[in-house]
Image: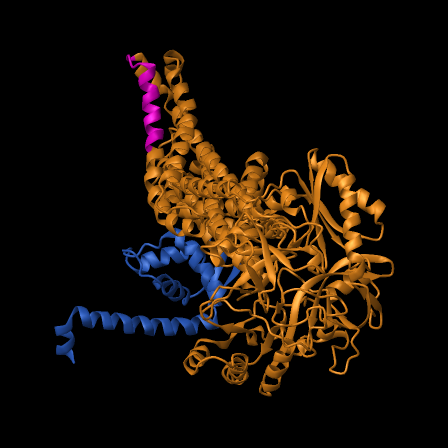
Chain colours: A orange, B blue
Amino acid sequence: MTGRVPSSEQLDREIDDFLDRETEDNIDRGMPPRAARRAALVSFGNRAIVREDTSAVFRWVWLDQLRQDLAYAGRTLGRTPAFVLSVVLTLGIGIGVNTAIFSVFNATLLRTLPVPSPEDLFQVSVQAPVPVVQRYSYPMFERLHAAVPATASLAAMSRVARMYLSSEGTREAVGVQLVSTGFFDVAKIRAEQGRFFASDDAAQVAIISDGYRRRHFGSSFDVVGRVLTINGVDVTVVGVASPGFSGVWLESPTDVWLPLSMQHLVHYNQNMSVDNADTEAPWIGQEGVRWVQLMGRSSDKASMLAALNMVYRNELLVSSPDLSAAARQRLLQERRLILDPLSHGLSNLRPRLLTPLGVLMGMVAFLLLMASANGALLLMARASTRRQEMDLRLSIGASRGRIVRQLLTESTLLVGAAMIAGVVFAAWAGTALARQLAAAGGNVAQLVVPLDFRVLAFAIGVTVVTGLLFGLVPALTLSETRLVNHSGRGTVGGRLMAKLLIALQIAVSLCLLVGAGLFVRAFRTLTETNIGFDPRPVVTARINPRLAGYGEGALPALNDRVLAHARSLPGVTSAALAGCGLASQCQSLSDVVIAGYDASPGEQVRFLENGVTPGYFSTVGMQLVAGRDFGPSDTDTSPKVAIVNRSAARTYFRGQGPVGARFGYDAPDIEIIGVVDDARVLSVQEAPVPMAYYPLTQRRHLAFNLEVRTTGDPSRLALELPKLLAAREPDLTIERTGLLSDQVSRSIGQERFVAVLTTLFGGVALALSCGGLLGLTSYAVSQRTPEFGLRLALGASPHRLLQLVLREALTLIALGLIAGAPIVWLLLAPVSRWLFEIRTTDPTPLAAAGLVLVTVATLASLVPAWRAARVNPVSALRMD
Amino acid sequence: VDLLQGTLDLLILRTLRTGPLHGHAVAKAIARGSGDVLQVEQGSLYPALYRLIKRGWIDVEEGTSENNRRAKFYRLTAKGRKQLQSEVSKWEALTAAVARILHPLTGEGRS
C-alpha cells in the first residue's frame, strides 16, 4: 500500500473538480449553466455514498461504523434512562436466574473434582438384585487393598462428620473425614505443606484443607506442628492439602482428615452396619462393623475389577457357609463388585436436586423467552416513536443493513448490560438457591457454587440467544419502513410481529402457570399428609453430653436432671429424650431376627430404630394403639423391651398381635410390649417403614434430642429452654433449639421453595403477557381513535366498539392458548411423573391455568376497550 | 452497456498507460475510447481509483491541468504496468474463449 492515503478533504475537492468539469462539458454541449450543473449532479449520483464507498477502500469500515454505532447508541439510550433500566432489569433478571440455576446444575452435575485425571477415580460398589449395604469393614478393605494390581490404588474413607474443633480458645464445628493412609495418593493430591499420612503414623495426626487453613489461621502460613483439639482429642497437624481440594463429598466439604485408626478416639459413629460386633470397641479391627467406603484409581478398570471380584467372591462364600450349592451359585452370579465413576464427587444432594433443577431450568428458560419477547415489544414500541428518524436516515441514503446494524448495536448494548447484571445476580443467587433447594432437616448443605468458565460460557450463550430474539426481530420489522408512507401508523409487519409476540407470551404463560399449579398442589399434598405426630406444641433441643465429657455412667443421672429442668418450666406438660430427633436426618437401621417369622432368601428384615424415655409418645403426640409405654422399671438391667410401629406389626406379625412377641439382633431376646401408630419420623415425604423403639436406658447414643411439650407459647419456650439448661448445666453442649414444627417444615423446604419459585415465575409470566396485551391494545385503540369516532358518528353503539376491541384481544388470547395447550399436554406427563402423587392425565391444572389466564388477560384488554367505547366522536374526528 | 465486473480496473489502467490523467478525464477517455458505448458509472469511479492506489498499481500526484486548475493526476506505476499486461492477456483469453462458445462453427472453420 502506498503511504499516501488520500484524506476525505482531498476526495471532496476531487469530487468538486469532477463536477465542475462535467458542468463545463455540459455547457459546451449547449446547456444553460444551471441545467448543466444539475445534470452533472444527477449523473454523479449520491455524493455521500460515493464518499463512503471510496473511503471504505482504505479503512476498516466495520470497525469505524461500530464506533459510530456505539457512540450513537450510547447517546440515544442515554436519553431514555427509564426504558434502559426496565429492559436491563427484565433481561438481567431473566439471564441471572437462568445462570444461577445453571450454576447449581454445574456445581452438582457437571463439575469434576479438582484432582488430576478425575475420570480415573471410582467408587467400589456392590451390585445386587436387592438393596445391600454399600460399606465395608476395615479388614475387608485390607484384603481388597492387598489384591489391587500395582497399576491401581485403593483407599478407604468414612463419611464427613461434623466434629467440634477447639484451638486457642475458640470452638467450632468442622467437617472431619477419616481416611486410610493412601487416600491422598489415590486422589493424586499434593501436599501444600508438610506431608500426608504415612503407614507408620502415630495415631494422633491430622491433615487440614487449604480452605480451612485460610479461614482459621489466616495469614500465618506455616501450620505444620500446630495442635488442634477435635472432639476433645489433641491432634498434630502434619500437612495441608493442595488449594481447592475439600474432599470428595460435594455438600460436605472436609476441613480436617484424620487416620481411620482414630475412629474410637473421636467418637465417630456414623454410617455403620453392625453384624455381631461391639460398636463401643474400636471399629478398625472388627469384621462385623461395616463403615468405610472405597475409593480407587485405575486407568485399567477391567483388571482392577477382576482382582477385586476375586477377593469379593471368596468373601461371599466364606460369609455364607451353610447355603446349598445352587443357592451359592446364584449368589455368586447375582452379586459382584462394580466401579462407579467418582469423577464428579459423591453427593446425597445430586438425586434430590436433579428433578427440581430440571424443572426450574425449563421454567426459567421459558421465562427468559417471555422477558425477551417483552423487551422486543418495548423496543418496538419505542421504535414507533423513532419512525421519523428511521425514515429520515433511509431517505438520505442509509442502507437497510446499516439501520438494522444500528438497532442491533443498541440492543446488544442493552443485552450486554443485562448480562453483567445477570452474572452479578447469579453469583449471589447460585449459592443461596443451592442451600434453599437442599434444605432438609436441620442440616444446611455447604455446597459451594462457583462461577467457573462453564457458567460464564452459559451466561454468554444465553445472552446471545436472548439478544437475537430481543434485538433482531424488532430491527428487521422496523427497517421495513416505507419511505413515502408517513402516516405514523405502524407498518403491517410490525403490528403482526407484535401480535405474534403477545400470542407467544400467552402460550408460555400458560405453560408456566400450569407448572406452578402442579408444584403448589404437590406441596399442598405434602402439608396435608398425616405425619403421625403433632409437632405444633413441641420444642426440640439437641444436646451433646459426650462432648461435655460425660461418661457412660453419668448419663442416666444427667438425663433425669435435664428432664426435670425442662418439666420445671411454666406451661410444660411433658418432656422426653430420644436418640434421634424427628425429621432431623438422623436415622439408625438394624437387621433383626423375629421369632416365628421366616424370612424368604435374600429378604432383609430390618427395623428403623430409636431409643426414647418414658412419655416420649405422648410428648410428640404419637398414639399408642396397643400394650403399654415404657416406664421407670425398664432399666439397663431389666429384661429388654421394645415398642414397634404399626408397619412393623402389619409386616412381620400378621395374624396375631405383636405384643408379647420377641425379636432381636442375633437372638430374639427383646420382648415387644406395645404398638404405636405409624409416623413419618424421617421426613414428610418418606412413608413409614417398620420401626422399633427401645427404652433409652437400654441403648447407647452419643447425642440426645430433648422434646418438650407445652400448653403455652412454644416459641417462648424455645427461648427459655436453652437459657435454663445453660444456667443449670453449664458444661452441657446445646447444639440447637427450635420448634419441632419448624424442623418438620424444613424437611419439606425444597418442595415449598420450588412451589414458591414456580408460583412467582407463573405470576411474572402472567404479568408480562397481560402487560404486553394491555400495551398493544391501548396502542391499537389510540391509533384507531379517529376511526372509532367516525363509527360512532355513523351510529355505531359504544357497546359495539367495546366488542370490536375485545374481539381482537380475545383472538390473541385464544391463539396463545391454542398454541400453548399442546405444549403443556406434551410436558405434563413427564413432569408429573417426577412429582409427588399427581395423576398425569388430570386436566384440572390446565383448565385452571387457562381460566386464570383468560380472566386476567380479558380484564387487561378491557381497560383500553372501555376507553375506545368512550371516544368522543367530535374530538376524535378533529384529530385527523 | 454495463461494464463487466472487474473490467473497470482494466480500463482505468489501460487509459492511464498513455500518461497521467485526472479523474474526470479518465471517465471521459473511457467513454470516448469506447465510442460512447461504455459509460463509467461515476459513483464507482472513485472507489475503483482508490482501490488501485491501495494495491499500488497507480499513484496520485498534485498537478496543474490544461486550464491552469489544480487537480489530482493519476499515474500508472511500474507494478501497475505489469498488472496491465497480465490483465490484458487474461482479458484476451477470456474474450477468445467466450467467442469460441458463441460462434462454434466459425471457430472450427478457421482452425
Q: Is residue A100 left or right of residue B106?
A: right
B47 or B37: nearer the viewer:
B47
Q: Is residue A43 above or below residue A273?
A: above
The range drawn in magenta is A794-811
- Residue lying farthest bottom? A150
Residue at x-position 43% and y-position 72%: B81
Evaluate whether residue A310 shows in this view.
Answer: yes
Q: Was residue A861 drawn as part of the magenta stretch in this picture?
A: no
Q: Was residue A810 drawn as part of the magenta stretch in this picture?
A: yes
Magenta portion: prevailing SS class: helix
Q: Is residue A855 above or below residue B43?
A: above
Q: Is residue A252 above or below residue A39?
A: below
- Residue lying farthest right? A168
Residue A56 pos. (x, y %): 48, 55
Q: Please identify the quarter of the rendering in which residue A575 is found.
A: top right
Specify the quadrant that holds the C terminus of chain A.
Answer: top left
B101 or B110: nearer the viewer:
B101
Evaluate whether residue A787 shows in this view.
Answer: no
Residue at x-position 36% and y-position 13%: A873
Q: Give the total of numbered labels.
A: 0
Residue B85 pos. (x, y %): 38, 74
Residue A388 pos. (x, y %): 45, 33
Q: Is residue A726 left or right of residue A696?
A: right
Residue A214 pos. (x, y %): 77, 62
